[in-house]
Structures are given as structure tokens and as C-alpha cells.
Amino acid sequence: MIRLILVLVFVVATLSGCAKDVSDLEQYIAEVHARKGGRIDPLPQIKPYETFVYSASDIRSPFIPAVEDRQTSVSTSSVRPDQARAREFLEQFPLDTLRMVGTLGLGGGEYALVKTADGLLHRVRVGNHMGQSEGRVVEISDSEIKLIEIISDGLGGYIERPAAVALSD
């Protein structure tokens, strides 16, 4: 019986805490409803899309070089990759993944030490090839390896482009 009275007192005390005074909330809601509504600006006018018809089919496309440009570049370009040459090991790697880590003088010749992405070291000397664009080593200094690459000019010919692999820190 005492338990029942204690439980009943506890329930009454708990429920009495839920009955708070909400008159200030009701007053605020009444004030908000009594306010005069504001004016909403109209949506901006959307301009209709104007179509454009490209009617220059009789004019040369800007994405194709002129005929005289193609003929001169193809006829004067004597640079070609040597397809018969055996590929060297470092030609399978993109040039930007190869790192120069030093130089080595051995038997009167100068070599550059090149590290591949897999961590292996390779010796390179002038005349060797490296990189995927027919890069031929033309000079080795203490700070870089200078190469000449043969790349496509986009017109059916090839051009030579200088490249370098700098010493890594």
C-alpha cells in the first residue's frame, strides 16, 4: 500500500511539471498574426533563348589546318621515329615518373642515375633513350638530363621537342 502511494505521488509530481505557463508564447503568436504582411517583389523576367544558326558550311573549318599549312609541314618534316630501333627499358615509363638522383663517372664516361617509380636505379648515358616519346639523351650535367623527344605535330608529321629530367632532392 505504501508503494502504491509513493508511485501515485511520483506520477502526480511528474505530471505537474509538464503544466507550464504558455501565455507568453500565445501572446507572441497573436502579435505575429496581427502584423501587416509585407510586399514580395515580382520574379525577374526571363529572357527567351535566341537560337543561332551556323551557316558557314562553305568556309574552312577552324579545327582543320589550311591545305598549304598541311603540305608544307608534311613535306619539310624529315624527323621520324626509328621504328626499327630496339626499345630500351626506360622507354616504358612516362618521363614525369622518372627521377634523376645523381651522376656517376665510371671508366672515363659520365652516367646519370635514374630512379623509376618502383624504386630501381638505372644508369643512363648520352645516346640512351628514355620516356614514352622517343626521348634521346643529349646531355648530362650535375643538375639535369637533357633530352630531345620526337612527338607528332598533329598533321601527319613529327617535330623535335626539348625535355629534361631534373635532379631530385
Image: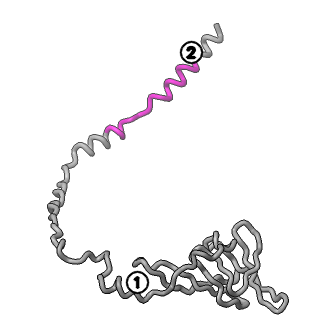
Quick one: quadrant of the N terminus? Answer: top right
Residue closer to the observer: 15 or 42: 42
Quarter where residue 82 is shown: bottom right
Q: Which residue is mark 2?
A: 8
Quick one: quadrant of the C terminus? Answer: bottom right
The scheme the figure's colours follow is: one colour
Q: Main secondary structure of the magenta part?
A: helix
**Most extreme residue toward the top, as rendered?**
1
Q: Which residues are magenta?
A: 9-26
Question: Which label belongs to residue 74?
Answer: 1
Question: Which label belongs to residue 12?
Answer: none
Quarter where residue 115 is shown: bottom right
Is 67 placed above or below 3 here? below
Residue at image point 41% right, 34% down: 21
**Most extreme residue toward the front, as rendered?**
84
Mark toward the viewer: 1 or 2: 1
Residue at image point 56% right, 15% down: 8
Q: Is residue 16 magenta?
A: yes
Q: Secondary structure at mark 1?
A: helix
Image spot of residue 79 (x, y percent): 51, 85
Image spot of residue 89 (x, y percent): 69, 71
**Most extreme residue toward the right, as rendered?**
107
Residue closer to the observer: 71 or 44: 71
What is the spatial separation of the Cα atoms under label 1 and label 2, in whole angstroms?
103 Å
Is 26 placed above or below 62 here? above
Residue at image point 59% right, 73% down: 132
Residue 99 left/right relative to 51: right
